[in-house]
Image (cartoon, grey):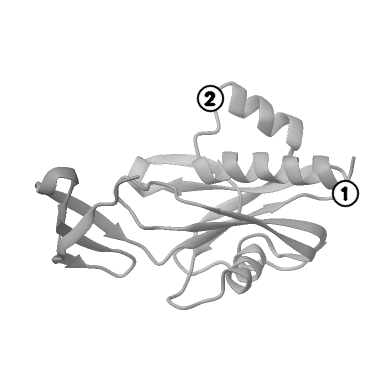
Amino acid sequence: MYIEKEIQRNTVHRGRIVNVRSDIAEIHGGKHVSREVVEHPGGVCVVPIDHDNICWCVRQFRYPVLTELLEFPAGKLDRGEDPRACAIRELKEETGLTAGQLIDLGSMYPSPGYSDEVLHLYLALDLEKGPANLDEDEYLSVEQVPIDTLLALVAENKLPDAKTVMGLFKAMQYLKHTVG
């Protein structure tokens, strides 16, 4: 395995959510190449499934892709925040749900070709409903969708959100190996 070596780091943008770097890296053979990196504090995605195998999803407009997406509840980590605490917060804020069980499903790199973001996935079970508490700039609707319907949407290429697809499959694998 070959590891590229950072030669120079240059931050070209500092934003509210992300920073952008234009680095110089040394690759195999000593050649220097440009690497662009989006620094992101990371996030969480929570897969809430009730006792009837209904998933609680959110539908919201995503400006970068200019479309409305069906997703699992998710959110950005505050710098230094524990991912589990973030998952509990985001689940409650977006859906009003609290989980009797919150199971760590691991993490993923959503776009490792240009971003250092790590997304932590959780399965939420034994759900209890309460009031949601959306951020002031957050507009979404909560939808209850059967697992089989979500799987059909994946098969039909109608569920393009990567964290939702990965969360769904990891949750199903967990449930398959622990429930039956």
Camera-side residue of 110 and 141: 110
- Element at badge 1? loop
**Mark 2 Cα-neighbour bin, 10 Å: few <14, some 14–19, many ≥20:** few
* Labels 2 & 1 near each other (Cβ < 8 A): no
Residue hosting label 1: 51
**Mark 1 Cα-neighbour bin, 10 Å: few <14, some 14–19, many ≥20:** few
Q: Residue furthest bottom?
A: 80
Q: Amino acid at mark 1?
A: His
Residue hosting label 2: 157
Q: Residue 86 at x, y = what percent?
A: 58, 70
Q: Residue at x 36, y 41 (%)?
A: 65
Q: Amino acid at mark 2?
A: Asn
- Residue 29 sits in quarter: top left
Q: Residue 54 at x, y = what percent?
A: 79, 43
- Element at badge 2? loop
Image side of residue 39 versus residue 29, left or right = right
Mark 2 vs mark 1: which is more N-terminal? 1
Image side of residue 145 versus residue 137, left or right = right
